[in-house]
Image (cartoon, coloured by chain):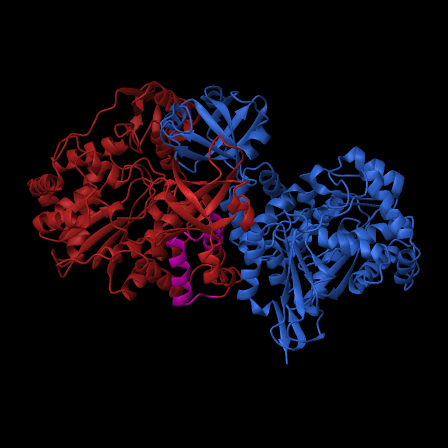
Chain colours: A blue, B red
């Protein structure tokens, strides 16, 4: 095939500043010599090469002169970055090579189990951007129709670790925590890091930004300090303070995970095997040795029953042990949002209130953080069994955690004050009674409509707790927004979804 | 939700003449008020509305002024056509409604069977363009992982029929034929239509253009006459001549089929249930009452063993009977290409040679056409059992079929001479011996590289048959191309794929 590549025809690179998410896209003239000679049609997969880099892209075609000259190829940002080209650079276009790993996907669709090598082949091609959305969806659907068994889950975890960077730390014990999503306001991580680092453990925490939630830990921390640290900067902070609170974007830990998660969200399927590989591959790649996993259980949380939570926990711990990672799973109450704020800055205020021992600090957030920090301390041998919670609470109460948090933020670039929203509007109860249900999913949706996480100050404050007696006219939630339009949009949604907070007479 | 729709913000429509295949795409400025206020990100699904039409589209975002003004939304051709807008028309943008049918897809992924209503809901949403590639792939993968059972296959067939147009004809018996793909040059349809219409049957044939093959029947017929007939024109031709050879694009027969097939080709999966629903939904929607199905069997054909062909045939006939359609399946030799030409015009020349009783006409094509036409005649009661082949051969031999073919073409707009390619290059055998294998898939690929089906005259002529003794230097294939570049590309491929035609000493 060398002969073909040598003769691959050339177009001039044109940057379109087009965002297509992870998928590389190239736009060519339908009448250009490349499309004609290669027999390319819209949505063909093509191989783009420039210098020593190559990327597989989806082709769209355009008619006429308005957008492109006949010898130009316009690239989406994903394609532009992966190719590393400059405006006008020559790009060679050819048919992509056959994806050998797709035969593994097809076998898997028909129920054959995949070995380590087959799984590694799939994940390598996924990370290299060679899988279209159709291929990604087929792989994930196949592993939902015929769930991943224990060996396959390990193979997938291993493959996901190997397809990215791996960190290592100068400490025998490196701790971490992870919450199995689904609960608005559950922002325990900054508090846990502050407590366990104050008590001498090493916790180099990397977090993600929100994908579909109103805030990720990285979004919240960004309202307080700089989070986009590169690896040398992370190392400096961790060596000085024992912990950091960085955005994971600067390091490529398990990059397949982000791609899989995006497709799973579109499908709204979330299989146990994929979830386990997702969580563990990130932790292992980050160099953790001991990890505490929080599984919130509730009717509108990701895990809906204690039994399902227990089964998931057992599989997580068992798979972790295959990689020498010591894990423990805790179930927690997932029946309502945690703390008061939902949205980056509003959650940061809750975190600060807990760390500063503010008498109005949300007690549920404080207790959850102490439970998780206590479990970390016990797992790492820094507290005796049963003493973890007390040790954590003590470090909070006497200011050591707050002091450590300030020092970590200083080391990352300085502690700052979270922004406040321009517009606030309370939503009042339409009747008196007892709060019997708060819908986590709708609370998250409302906060996003109000502008979170892009508008850092936007979101909402939950003003009531389950079981609370309220009077008609009392505020249930307060919407925080930066623009009148976003406020209106959130209020419309709230008016159409009276089951956001249910009240029983 | 009315409140939301009323307030849906507006952008000005801009036609980009962008081809993205079936998926509607809209491009907006990432900083436009709609993206900001709706919290839209790249690859969000959005609902576009203009006048009384609406379409769901995939959003891409663009930075800066180069492509779009902040108040513009650029539409792909699919979105433009479905919305029916003019340049500058206002477009309302909002979040799409929840797709209820996706819960059926999720249940199907986990192995639950779908009833008629669930299947109809899925197919309706697919045809309305509400399924992204991810959703389409998940549905098709699920029905491959847990194959469609008999009832589901019927439900899917029914749903696919109902989601499109249905034709009806003024005749008690309406015949059709269909070949289960995979064999280059197998262009029997024009000959079969000419024979059975000459013998008094009604055969209103609609055919597709090539999707991934070097020629579809519509591509071949287009080199001989006009094929884009609307329904009144088809009716006129059929009433006058008993048959037509039209492109199916002007009628929406089972439009879901084209969408499913596109995704199946990307995945390279082809399940029996989907294939049955695909074939039968088109035939039933076209108003057929009696259909003959040709199943070529061979090592590089779609069906690879007689047993698999028999099982598929039984399911096809059984499912057809549920819809009152009388079907019969014939297996045929799928071990090598049919006739000489591969490509639109080259196949048309073979068809003409058979119809005109040219002594050099490919005998395999003639025999296949007579076999199929004979089976149609017997199935429709126009020939006694065992007499069909003879009756068909007689209609060919005495010129009635050729005369009917000419009249059909005249009625469709006039018979024309197929174009001839500017460049021809024979590929010579590198050794002497016997031809033991011809790779159908590689022959098809070579013809496409030479420019077929877009370049109508391009493709190749197969110069040898299986079992033939040849000498080194004898031509195996002749490549036909319109441009030197396409010729070079095809020759490169042939040089790299010596197993196109295998010769044993």
Q: Residue at x 76, y 40 (%)?
A: A226
Q: Nearer the viewer, residue B207 or A338?
A: A338
Q: Residue at x 88, y 47 (%)?
A: A404
Q: Nearer the viewer, residue A48 or B193?
A: A48
In the rendering, at what x and y percent does residue A449 appear?
58, 55
Look at the image and tell me whether residue A412 can be seen: yes
Tell me, yes or no, whether the highlighted magenta stretch contains residue A1: no
Look at the image and tell me whether residue A1 can be seen: no
- Majority SS type along the magenta span: helix
Which portion, as a residue range, is magenta?
A: B113-141
In this rendering, is residue B151 above or below A90? below
Residue A285 image-quadrant placement? top right
In this rendering, is residue A205 above or below A317? above
In the rendering, at what x and y percent does residue B452 appear?
31, 31
In this rendering, is residue B274 above or below A501? above
In this rendering, is residue B168 above or below B80? below
In the rendering, at what x and y percent does residue A183 appear?
68, 60
Give the number of marks. Answer: 0
Q: Nearer the viewer, residue A436 or B407?
A: A436
Name, please, the residue furthest toward the bottom. Answer: A505
**Quarter the C terminus of chain A occupies:** bottom right
Left or right: B504 as drawn, with respect to B67: left
Left or right: A469 as drawn, with respect to A193: left
Tell me, yes or no, whether the highlighted magenta stretch contains residue B117: yes
Left or right: B261 as drawn, with respect to A208: left
Q: Nearer the viewer, residue A321 or A403?
A: A403
In the rendering, at what x and y percent does residue B139 appear?
46, 55
């Amino acid at each position: 095939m060398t002969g073909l590549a040598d003769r691959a025809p050339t177009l001039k690179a044109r940057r379109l500043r087009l965002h297509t998410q992870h998928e590389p896209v190239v736009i060519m003239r339908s009448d250009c010599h490349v499309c004609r000679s290669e027999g390319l049609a819209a949505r063909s997969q093509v191989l783009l090469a420039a210098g020593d880099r190559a990327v597989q892209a989806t082709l769209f075609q355009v008619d006429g002169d308005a957008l492109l000259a006949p010898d130009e190829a316009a690239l989406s940002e994903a394609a532009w970055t992966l190719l590393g080209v400059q405006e006008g650079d020559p790009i060679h276009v050819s048919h992509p090579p056959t994806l050998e790993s797709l035969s593994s996907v097809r076998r898997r669709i028909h129920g054959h189990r995949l070995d380590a090598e087959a799984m590694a082949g799939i994940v390598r091609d996924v990370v290299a951007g060679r899988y279209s959305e159709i291929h990604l969806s087929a792989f994930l659907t196949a592993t939902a129709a015929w769930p991943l068994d224990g060996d396959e889950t390990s193979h997938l975890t291993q493959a996901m670790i190997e397809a990215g960077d791996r960190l290592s730390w100068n400490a025998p014990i490196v701790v971490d925590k992870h919450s199995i999503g689904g609960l608005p306001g559950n922002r325990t991580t900054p508090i846990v890091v502050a407590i366990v680092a104050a008590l001498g453990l090493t916790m180099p925490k990397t977090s993600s930004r929100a994908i579909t939630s109103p805030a990720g830990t990285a979004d919240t921390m960004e309202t307080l300090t700089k989070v986009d640290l590169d690896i040398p900067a992370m190392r400096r902070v961790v060596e000085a303070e024992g912990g950091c609170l960085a955005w994971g974007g600067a390091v490529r830990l398990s990059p397949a995970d982000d791609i899989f998660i995006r497709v799973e969200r579109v499908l709204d399927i979330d299989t146990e095997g994929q979830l386990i590989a997702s969580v563990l591959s990130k932790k292992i790649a980050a160099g953790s040795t001991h990890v505490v996993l929080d599984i919130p259980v509730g009717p509108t949380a990701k895990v809906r029953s204690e039994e399902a939570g227990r089964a998931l926990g057992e599989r997580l711990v068992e798979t972790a042990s295959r990689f020498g990672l010591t894990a423990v799973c805790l179930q927690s109450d997932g029946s309502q949002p945690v703390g008061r704020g939902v949205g980056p800055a509003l959650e940061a205020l809750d975190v600060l209130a807990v760390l500063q021992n503010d008498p109005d600090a949300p007690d549920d957030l404080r207790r959850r953080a102490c439970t998780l920090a206590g479990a970390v301390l016990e797992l790492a041998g820094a507290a005796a069994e049963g003493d973890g919670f007390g040790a954590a609470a003590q470090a909070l109460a006497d200011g050591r955690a707050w002091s450590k948090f300030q020092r970590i933020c200083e080391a990352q670039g300085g502690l700052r004050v979270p922004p406040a929203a321009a517009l606030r509007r309370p939503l009042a109860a339409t009747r008196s009674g007892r709060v019997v249900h708060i819908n986590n999913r709708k609370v998250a949706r409302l906060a996003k409509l109000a502008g979170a996480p892009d508008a850092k100050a936007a979101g909402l404050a939950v003003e009531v707790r389950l079981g609370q007696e309220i009077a008609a006219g009392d505020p249930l939630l307060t919407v925080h927004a930066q623009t009148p339009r976003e406020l209106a949009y959130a209020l419309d949604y709230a008016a159409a979804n009276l089951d956001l907070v249910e009240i029983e007479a």
